[in-house]
Amino acid sequence: MNSLKDTIIIFILYLFKLGKVKTTHLVIVALFMFGTWPAFAFDVSQINVGANPWAISIDPNTNRIFVTNFGNDSVSVIDGNTNTVIKQITVNDSPTGIVVNPDSGLVYVSRLSSHAVTVIDERTFTITSNITVGTQPNGLGLNPVTGYIYVTNMGDRTVSVIDGKTNSVIDTIQVQLRPTAVSVNPSTNTLYVTNSGSGTVSVINTNTNTVSNTIPTGKGPTDVAINLYSNTVYVTDSPTSQIFLIDAKNNTVLSKIPVGSNPDGVSIDYSKNRIFVANSGNGTVSVIDGNTRMATDVIPVGKHPFAIATNPLTGMTYTANDTPGIVYVISDNENSTSSLQQQLDAAKSLAETKTLDKRQSDDIQNAIVLAEIGIPIGFGVSVSIFIFKTKK
């Protein structure tokens, strides 16, 4: 016996021998079954926005956060210094994707039902133009070097290319079924597009605007983000509750990491090489260590977190919860503590996201906590072990 896991197992068996744990089936949530555990080294606050917030984009220069509200045809503008809404802009026609160009101060909003992209001047909060694109535009991506904006059109399997200088479409790229999200690597002039209807990611050479590769990524990839430092692409696959890691050097899948139920949005914290994943199916955000490629934390954030974005300068992460219209703000708090009920709620949420047989599922759904053991493992972190009673 030479590991922490061995020590815990011995201790649990000792409790069982003493009659302290009278169960026929023990489920040790998180650490052993899932390779992660709920942790609360984060502060979480909330901001009320419009109905059904859909997407988030951040201007780090002004520390403003822009949120599309699909349910009431608007864009909420949040001041990141005070985390309060300072403006709500009406755009109409079911706004979905959004991206801000910090250099030009222009905000681009895709409008799903009008097949157009609206351009907003961040300085005046006024609409300056509307650009006709493909059918059912959704995701937006920006190349900060060229100023080009890329729009995924879910209805006609295309990506529109907009020149940010003229705000006009200069090219259209054919991809696969139901493209949802897009991310740009400006250093390699490469575009990554998730095709949720085909279970693939299209890799596009932006010099020629042609598809150079197609990568299988589960059953329904929803969002994509690129870590420019490690040259790693992160793709959420909602149906399988996993995130795919792609090596951008050779466009091959490095690994798959289990996260929460129905992961949607993904963002990167460059300052700490962390990846945040919004799990809409169980109301959590998974935190992945970019160095170890392991999920390290689970943060409860309401009922249905969808989009997520991280400010590269402040490190603050914002996730949109569309039931109801709330944006949750996640920040580091290394000294924070949590109640047993908070930890239990998070552990249950985590447990419910995994593929279990019927007995395990019934056990967890009807579980009661018998013991909670805090075991220090260094760096001030404590692992919480939850032992659940089997349903009789």
Image (spheres, grey):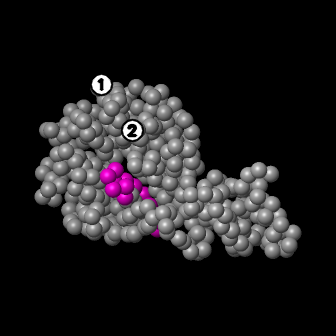
Vertically, is 99 above or below 281? Answer: above
**Is 217 positioned to the left or the right of 123 in the image?**
right
**Is 333 positioned to the left or the right of 344 in the image?**
left
- Disc 2 versus disc 1: nearer the observer: 2
**Residue drawn at x 76%, y 58% as measured from the top left:** 7
- The amino acid pointed to by label 2 is Leu
Question: Is any part of residue 285 visible from this angle?
Answer: yes
227 and 54: which is toward the camera: 227
Q: Which residue is labeled 2 in the image? A: 228
For mark 2, give the secondary structure. Answer: loop
Q: Position of residue 46 (x, y in %)?
A: 38, 69
Q: Classify mark 1: residues with Cα within 10 Å, few (<14), some (14-19) or many (20+).
A: few
Find the magenta span and give its range.
300-316
Question: Is any part of residue 195 visible from this angle?
Answer: no
Q: Does residue 245 show up magenta in the picture?
A: no
100 and 365: which is toward the camera: 100
Residue 196's disc is none
**Is 223 positioned to the left or the right of 47 in the image?**
right
Residue 208's disc is 1
